[in-house]
Amino acid sequence: MTSRAAGDTAWVLEPVLEVPHVVAAVLLTRDGLVTGYTDALSQPSAERVAAITSTVQGACRTAAAAFADSDRAEIRQVVIESDHGYVLIVPTDHGTCVAAYGDPEVRLDLLAHRVHSQVARLGEKAMAAGPRGADGDTAA
């Protein structure tokens, strides 16, 4: 399995797929736009996953804030367990998110470790990128 995207996101998703029993993964923006997805998904499926993932994150932030009696909360991860397997959603600090799906046999601890590692690498890459100018070009 490889990842498909407009940009070069294979380096983010392919290590997640190396975890045994991981079926698919999506890289998305916080507002639900797909930036990369694995071959197990069609583009319409990846877009649907991204939209749902964005909504789930928003609901989880709201729930966490309500339970904490606070105005806002940032989530670190969301885990959904179903009879079909697990969905792990991990947002980054810079507006993207990795969502991965593993079948019921996946070791959730290994999946979480790998996804969090890739999210950390995404953050390092974002911090290493030069600032963007008003026209979108990288500043010199």
Image (cartoon, rainbow, N blue to C red):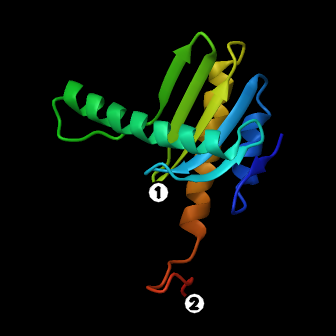
Q: Is residue 63 above or below residue 26?
A: above
Say whether residue 93 is left or right of residue 69.
right
Q: Residue 82: where, in percent of width, then height?
A: 55, 13
- Find residue 70 and report its horizontal and vertical position in percent: 17, 36
Residue occupying the point 16% across, 30% down: 69
**Which numbered dot is residue 94?**
1
Q: Tag 2: residue type?
A: Ala
Question: Furthest residue to the bottom?
Answer: 140
Determine the CA span between mark 1 and mark 2: 22 Å
Counting from the top left corner in percent of width and height, residue 90 is at: 52, 38
SS state under label 1: loop
Sequence-wise, which precedes: disc 1 or disc 2?
A: 1
The circle drawn on residue 140 is 2
Kindly identify the residue that appears in the image at 63 percent across and 38 percent down.
Answer: 45
Q: Quadrant of the N terminus?
A: top right
Kindly tell me whether residue 75 is visible in this rendering: no
Quadrant where the C terminus sits is bottom right
Name the amino acid, label 1: His
Q: Is residue 23 left or right of residue 44?
A: right
Give me the residue at 48% from left, 48% from top: 32
Q: Quadrant of residue 17?
A: top right
